[in-house]
Image: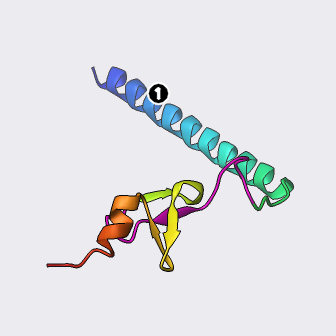
């Protein structure tokens, strides 16, 4: 019984060691790939800036927002209601 437990323990130590080494190698490979890539100013083509509605505080793409009174709004109704006032 003691020998069986010993070999099971050895198996798990070897298994954990190999997983640790594989993880370290993958991290090194990822770092090397990131270092060789040129930095990109816009990682996703077609992405755009997000703005926040002054009334309900939701975020929406700048192209869908209304800009009036130097504030951004998600809809005409919220623009008419004005900025949100805490109670």
69 over 51 or under it: above or below: below
| Residue range of the region highlighted in magenta in the rendering | 42-58
Q: Position of residue 14 (x, y in %)?
A: 52, 33
* Residue placed most toward the observer, 15 or 80: 80
Which residue is located at x 60 percent, y 61 percent?
A: 49
Q: Position of residue 70 (x, y in %)?
A: 51, 79
Q: Is residue 1 left or right of residue 65?
A: left
Quadrant housing residue 34: bottom right
According to the picture, the residue beneath numbered tag 1 turns out to be 11
Task: Reply yes or no: does residue 74 show up in magenta.
Answer: no
Q: Quadrant of the C terminus?
A: bottom left
**Quarter location, residue 10:** top left
Residue that sits furthest to the left in the current view: 87
Q: Callout 1: 10 Å neighbours few (<14), some, many (20+)?
A: few
With 86 as the anchor, is 17 left or right in this view? right
Give 4 or 22, whichever is nearer the viewer: 22
Between 46 and 44, the residue placed more toward the observer is 46
Q: Secondary structure at mark 1?
A: helix
Q: Is residue 44 above or below residue 22?
A: below
Estimate the x, y position of residue 13 in percent, counting from the top left: 47, 36
**Which residue is painted at 74% across and 46% down in the image?**
29
User: Is residue 48 covered in magenta?
Assistant: yes
So how many labels did they put on this image? 1
Relative to 87, 28 lies left or right:
right
* Residue 26: quadrant of the picture: top right
- Taking the spot 79% from the left edge, 58% from the top edge, the residue there is 40
Q: Main secondary structure of the magenta part?
A: loop
Which color scheme did the rendering employ for the protein? rainbow
Q: If the image is split into quadrants, where does the N terminus sit?
A: top left
- The residue located at (85%, 58%) in the rendering is 38
């Amino acid at each position: 019984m003691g020998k069986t437990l010993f070999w099971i323990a050895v198996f798990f130590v070897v298994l954990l060691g190999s997983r640790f080494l594989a993880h370290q190698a993958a991290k090194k490979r990822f770092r090397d790939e990131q270092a060789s890539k040129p930095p990109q100013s816009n990682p996703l083509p077609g992405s755009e800036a997000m703005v926040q509605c002054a009334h309900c505080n939701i975020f929406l793409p700048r192209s869908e927002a209304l800009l009036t009174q130097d504030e951004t709004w998600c809809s005409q109704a919220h623009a008419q209601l004005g900025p949100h006032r805490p109670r």
